[in-house]
Image: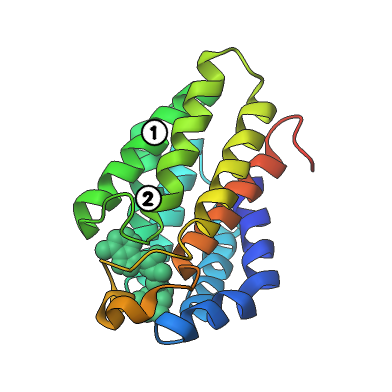
Amino acid sequence: MAWIDRAAEAVAAEKDRLTRLDSAIGDSDHGTNLHRGFTAARAALQAKPPQYPGAALVQVGMTLISSVGGASGPLYGTVFRRTGKALGEAEKVSARDLAGALADGLAGVRKLGGASVGDKTMVDVFTPAIDVFTARLADDASTADALEAAADAADAAALATIPLRARKGRASYLGERSEGHEDPGAASAALLWRALADTAPGGAR
Ligand code: ADP
Ligand code: MG
């Protein structure tokens, strides 16, 4: 719940930047889409506090699917819903459990949207972030350190979408004119990873 709170704050603070990125290679709605979605997700969690972490993430996913339009609503909704479903009804979730569940969430997005790494989408950020998170935990890093490294990888991966040509979503209609711009969904995915790192036990906040 702290993660979603922080994510909602970060999306609110960066709403204009996300929309500016989407105005270059999309239809200028990514910031407002996500702001509406995370505001609704946070309100839903507060109105009806879930019993366990998996239920919280399923609820966030359902709220994003119903409140965010466009491509990113169903895609982000799927990440959270599938991650939550993978956590099931466990009352305690370890960092390794979360890493495994997020990998399920990413698999759901890849199945729904058909994007691979390098297609200039949120998948470009989730993939290395989950890989780094998982690898650091396997090396016995603390949860906070593993998530910090994952958030750093996410930031780098978002910037690495700049030179790419979009092969999925609305930006792909632009062909080579999509080159030279950061993908808005990659940028928002990096915000979500930073929010998770900042709210981890022992994290920056
Ligand atoms: P829309 O494109 O419908 O206006 P948004 O602007 O909210 O939706 O979100 C656009 C973002 O969604 C893109 O920047 C990209 O990261 C992501 N996206 C679009 N299509 C796909 C896809 N098929 N798979 C994964 N992510 C995608
Ligand atoms: Mg858009």
Residue that label 2 marks: 79
- Disc 1 residue lies near ligand 1 with CB under 8 A: no
**Residue 174 as seen in the image, left or right of residue 158:** left
Name the residue: 28% across, 74% down. Answer: 172
Q: Is residue 194 visible?
A: yes
Between discs 2 and 1, the one toward the N terminus = 2
Q: Amino acid at mark 1?
A: Ala
Residue 167, which numbered label? none
> Which residue sits at x=47%, y=79%?
22
User: In the image shown, does 38 or 52 lie closer to the viewer?
Assistant: 38
Q: CA distance from mark 2 to mark 1?
A: 9 Å
**Which corner quadrant of the figure contains ligand 1?**
bottom left
Q: Nearer the viewer, residue 56 or 116?
A: 116
Q: Is residue 39 above or below residue 55?
A: below
* One can see residue 93 in this view: no
Amino acid on which disc 2 is placed: Val
Q: Is 23 rendered above or below residue 75?
A: below
Q: Is residue 46 placed above or below 52 in the rendered structure?
A: below
**Residue 171 % position (x, y):** 33, 77
- At 34% across and 68% down in the image, what residue appears? 165
Determine the image quadrant of residue 168: bottom left
* Colour scheme of the picture: rainbow
**Is ligand 1 closer than 8 angstroms to the Cβ of mark 2?**
no
Image spot of residue 134 (x, y percent): 48, 25
Residue 55: give x, y in percent of width and height.
Answer: 44, 42
- The residue beneath circle 1 is 101
For disc 1, the neighbor class at 10 Å (few under 14, some 14 to 19, many from 20) is many
